[in-house]
Image (cartoon, rainbow, N blue to C red):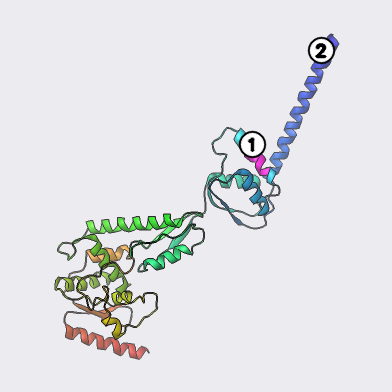
Amino acid sequence: MKRVAGLFVRATFVGLAIIMLSAFAAFLYFDYVRNTDGPNTKDAYFYVHPGAQPSELAISLEKGGYISDSQHYIWMHYWQRLSFTDEYLPKVGEYKIPAKASLNSIRDIFHMGKAIQRRLTFPEGLTTAAILSIIDNATGLLGNVPEGIEEGSLFPDTYFYIYGMQKTELVARMQAKMELELAEAWALRADSLPYKLPVEAHIMASIIEKETGRSGERALVASVFVNRLKRNMRLQSDPTVIYGVGATDKVNYEITKADLKANNPFNTYRIKGLPPTPIASPGRAALDAALNPKTSDYLYFVADGEGGHFFAKTLDEHNKNVRKYRARNSKAN
C-alpha cells in the first residue's frame, strides 16, 4: 500500500513537472513568436474599424502580410484578456505599422490608440460648394456630405481627423467654428456700424474676403463699403456680381455688361444694401475687418494691377485710378 502511494506521489510529481515544463516551453515559444520580426517589408497603414472583432483583425493582418499566422494574434488577444486588463480591445483608428513590426509591437500600436491624424486645409474665400467638394473627395472620410448647408457657414481653417470619421461630423465642426468666430468678432465690434445683426457682418466679411487677399487692405476695403452703406450708396462689388451669375468656379472671370445688368439679389450694382447671404466663407481676419473697419473718407477702390488697390474719396479721383489701372494692365499684356 505504501509502495502504491509512493508511486502515485512520484507520478503526480512527474506529471506536474511535465506540465510545468510544457507550460514554460509554451511560454518561451509564445514569447518568441510575439517578439519575432513580422513579414511586412515596408511601413504600411492599417485601419481598425468600429466593432472589429479580434478574429477579424487577425485574418486581415495575415492577409495584408503584417503577421505570419492569424492564430498567433488570437492567442495574444486571449492572453491579454487573462491578464485582467480592460485594455485588451484595440482602439478604433488608422495606424502606421512599421516594417518588420512584431506581434507585440502591433498590439502596442493598436492599444496605445495613437491613431494617425489626417488633415484638411481650407483657404479663405471658398464657397460652400467648393468646401463640400474637398470634403467629399478627402481620403478617409466616410458617409455623404450633408445637403442644405448655408453659404459661408463653414469656417476656413486646418482641421484634423482620423480615418473613418463621418463627413457630417467634420461639417458640423466647421459650422460650430464659424458660429464661435463670428460671435467673438461681433462682441468686439466697433461703434456706429451699419449692421443690426451678426449675419450682416458675416455677409460683409465674405465680400471683403473676395475683394482682397492682402491683410493690410481688409480694414480699408471694409471702410469703403461701410461708408457707402451709411450714405445709402450701392456697394458695386464685382465678387457679388460674379457670385450672382454663378461664375465663382471660373478663374479670372471677366465681368460682362450683361452681368452688371443681371437682375438677381446679389448684383450690388443694381440692389442697395447687402446681398441676402454671404458669397463665400470668410476667415477671422475678414470678420474682424468687417466689424472694425479703418476710419477713412474713401468711397471707391480699384485694383492697382500689382495685387493691391487704389483708393479714392471722389468719383473723379476714382476714374483717374481706373485709367491708371488700365494703363498698367495694357502694358503687362
Q: Quadrant of the N terminus?
A: top right
Alpha carbon distance from label 2 to label 1: 37 Å
Q: Is residue 237 found left or right of 246 in the rendered image?
A: left
Range of magenta residues = 72-77
Give the residue furthest to the top: 1
Magenta region includes residue 326: no
* Residue 196 in view (yes/no): yes
Q: Please, what secondary structure does the residue beneath circle 2 have?
A: helix
Binning the other alpha carbons within 10 Å of mark 2 as few (below 14), some (14 to 19) or many (20 upward) gives few
Identity of the residue drawn at 60% across and 35% down: 81
Q: Is residue 91 above or below residue 299?
A: above
- On the picture, is 147 further left or further right than 272? right
Q: Quadrant of residue 160?
A: bottom left
Q: Residues within 10 Å of mark 1 (few under 14, many from 20)?
A: few
Q: Main secondary structure of the magenta part?
A: helix
Q: How many marks?
A: 2
Q: Is residue 74 magenta?
A: yes
Residue 324 drawn at (x, y percent):
26, 87
Can you say which quadrant of the picture contains the C terminus? bottom left
Q: Nearer the viewer, residue 177 or 39?
A: 177
Disc with the residue nearer the chain's start (2 vs 1): 2
Q: Is residue 215 in sight in this rendering?
A: no
Where is residue 159? Give x, y as percent: 42, 58
Reading the image, the residue beneath label 2 is: 5
Residue under numbered circle 1: 79
| Looking at the image, residue 219 lies above or below residue 177 | below
**Image position of 306 with respect to 111: above or below:** below
Residue 299: x and y in percent read: 18, 77
* x, y percent for residue 210: 32, 72
Instruction: Give the number of the disc on residue 169.
Output: none
Amino acid type, mark 2: Ala
